Amino acid sequence: MGEQFQAHDGSDLIQAELSADAPAVAGWVGFVFVSGGLAVVPWTAYLAFTLPRSSQASHYRLAWVGFDLLLAFTLLRVGWTAAGGPTRNDRVELPATSAGTLLLIDAWFDTTTSADSRALAEALLLAVVVELPMAAICFWIAHHAEAIRERRLRLLPRLEQIRRR
């Protein structure tokens, strides 16, 4: 089997890679999301000038507890998926991306909603020591999982040809 793999010039692998190079999403998706992102910029400027500098939220505790429960669930999902062996840990990319994003959001809002300088120092310490490094690890996991999957997908047509012989 190994000799068959090396005996060919690789043109069938190149052809398989080219045929697998189809776009993952429809062309309109790019336009819609770029338009949406651009629309948020003037909206953000409007909010920057019109929102009050501070506000009292009647459900502040519920908002933070709910967010932290979502973060805990997402981190558990990353761990559960990663520990699931080769058949399940291939699916770790999306939960890892979600967890990394939630960790960045948590760090941002912890620091920007701090009530005083002591709370700000605690939030910054937690962000630098825990949340930002964990987010970086989550994004690395997602990137690594995607790279491995892309490599496997590029080799799959070639392996199928070898198996048929």
Image (cartoon, rainbow, N blue to C red):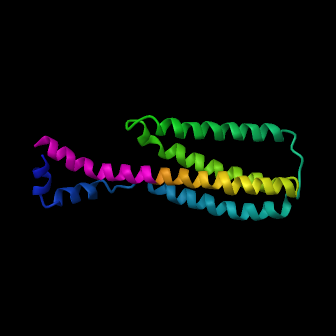
Q: Report which quarter residue 74 is drawn in.
A: top right
Q: Main secondary structure of the magenta part?
A: helix
- In the image, 58: left or right of 85? right
Residue 117, image x, y percentages: 86, 58
Residue that appears at 73% across and 60% down: 43
The residue lying toward the viewer, choosing from 114 and 60, is 114
Residue that appears at 48% across and 46% down: 93
Q: Report which quarter residue 13 is drawn in.
A: bottom left
The residue lying toward the viewer, choosing from 158 and 141, is 141
Residue 94, image x, y percentages: 51, 45
Residue 108, image x, y percentages: 72, 55
Asked if one can make out residue 60 in the rendered structure from this viewpoint, the answer is yes
- Report the label total: 0
Residue that appears at 85% across and 57% down: 51
Task: Give above or below for 151 relative to 74.
Answer: below
- In the image, 95: left or right of 62? left
Asked if one can make out residue 25 in the rendered structure from this viewpoint, the answer is no
Magenta-drawn segment: 144-165
Residue that appears at 38% across and 36% down: 87
The residue lying toward the viewer, choosing from 150 and 50, is 150
Q: Is residue 14 magenta?
A: no
- In the image, 76: left or right of 117? left
Q: Is residue 154 magenta?
A: yes
Quadrant where the C terminus is found in the figure: top left
Residue 97, image x, y percentages: 54, 49
